[in-house]
Amino acid sequence: MPQAWPHGWQPIENPDHRRAFREELEAEVGAGHLLKGLALDAVARRDGSDDYLFAAEDGRVAEVHLTFANRPERPPWPKAVMFESLDAWRRSRREEG
């Protein structure tokens, strides 16, 4: 993953933290959720919130608001938006900015 992140976002470099956030996502994603069954890796987090960026093997990324319930949630929780690529996600961040 590239080094430059949008304002307020930082990479998750610690492998234990990456694993913990991935496991939390897996625990929260219930039947019918758009992320169900996808192999995702936590790559970045937003400062001061529970928003995380997860990368899929096919190049897509998902911005997810984790609830930290540590159990399956009802869709649309955890709230998630899928982007076709990291670049598409970055463009969405610039448009919000």
Image (spheres, grey):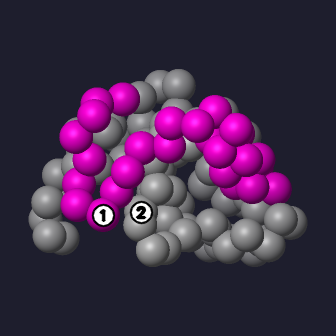
Callout 2: SS: strand
Mark 2, residues whose alpha carbon is within 10 Å: few (<14), some, or many (≥20)? some
Q: Which residues are magenta?
A: 1-27
Within the image, what quadrant is residue 34 found in?
bottom right
Q: Is residue 21 above or below residue 67?
A: above
Most extreme residue toward the top is 57
Mark 1, residues whose alpha carbon is within 10 Å: few (<14), some, or many (≥20)? few
Residue assigned mark 1: 8
Which image quarter holds the C terminus?
bottom left
Alpha carbon separation for disc pair 2 and 1: 6 Å
Left or right: 84 with respect to 92? right
Taking the spot 62% from the left edge, 67% from the top edge, the residue there is 66
Give the x, y percent position of residue 96: 18, 70
Give the x, y percent position of residue 84: 35, 40
Within the image, what quadrant is residue 18 found in?
top right
The amino acid pointed to by label 1 is Gly
Taking the spot 45% from the left edge, 74% from the top edge, the residue there is 48
Residue assigned mark 2: 46
Give the x, y percent position of residue 85: 32, 37
